[in-house]
Amino acid sequence: MIWVAVIAGLAVLVLLIIFILQNEDRVTVHYLGVAGELSLGMALFIAAVAGGILVAIAGATRILQLRSQRRHSKGNPAASPGPAATDGQEPKSAS
């Protein structure tokens, strides 16, 4: 199973290299007042990596937030009453 993932990853990398090589027209990129020239393929690659990093940071932050909530709720059993909880009324007996 691991070899399938390795082969798929290598195939994606080859396709990425082909994309960058086919898009080597020079473009001027402006970012926060700084301008520079680089190939179109590389500019798009950098933008995609930056977007992936932002998504990873947001996901890691959310995971840490959920773990913190879970850790705090474990120490306080009243925070999550569970399925056996009632609404404060005693059960009626059938007599």
Image (cartoon, rainbow, N blue to C red):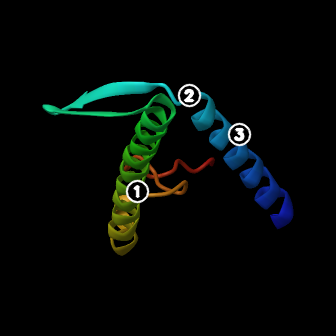
**Along the horizontal axis of the image, is 75 left or right of 22?**
left
Indicate the amino acid at tag 2. Asn
Q: Residue at x 47, y 55 (%)?
A: 85
Can residue 1 be seen at all in this image of the molecule?
A: no
The image quadrant of residue 50 is: top left
Label 1, label 2: how many angstroms apart (C-alpha)?
A: 33 Å
| Disc 1 + disc 2, Cβ < 8 Å | no
Depicted 72 relative to depicted 95: above or below: below
In front: 40, or 7? 40
Indicate the amino acid at tag 3. Leu
Residue topped by disc 3: 15
Residue 64: x and y in percent read 37, 61
Indicate the amino acid at tag 1. Ala
Mark 2 and mark 3 lie on one chain; the one further toward the N terminus is: 3
Q: Residue at x 58, y 36 (%)?
A: 20
| Disc 3 + disc 1, Cβ < 8 Å | no
Q: Residue at x 40, y 71 (%)?
A: 74
- For the N terminus, give its image quadrant: bottom right
Residue topped by disc 1: 60
Q: Which mark is residue 23?
A: 2
Q: Secondary structure at mark 2?
A: loop
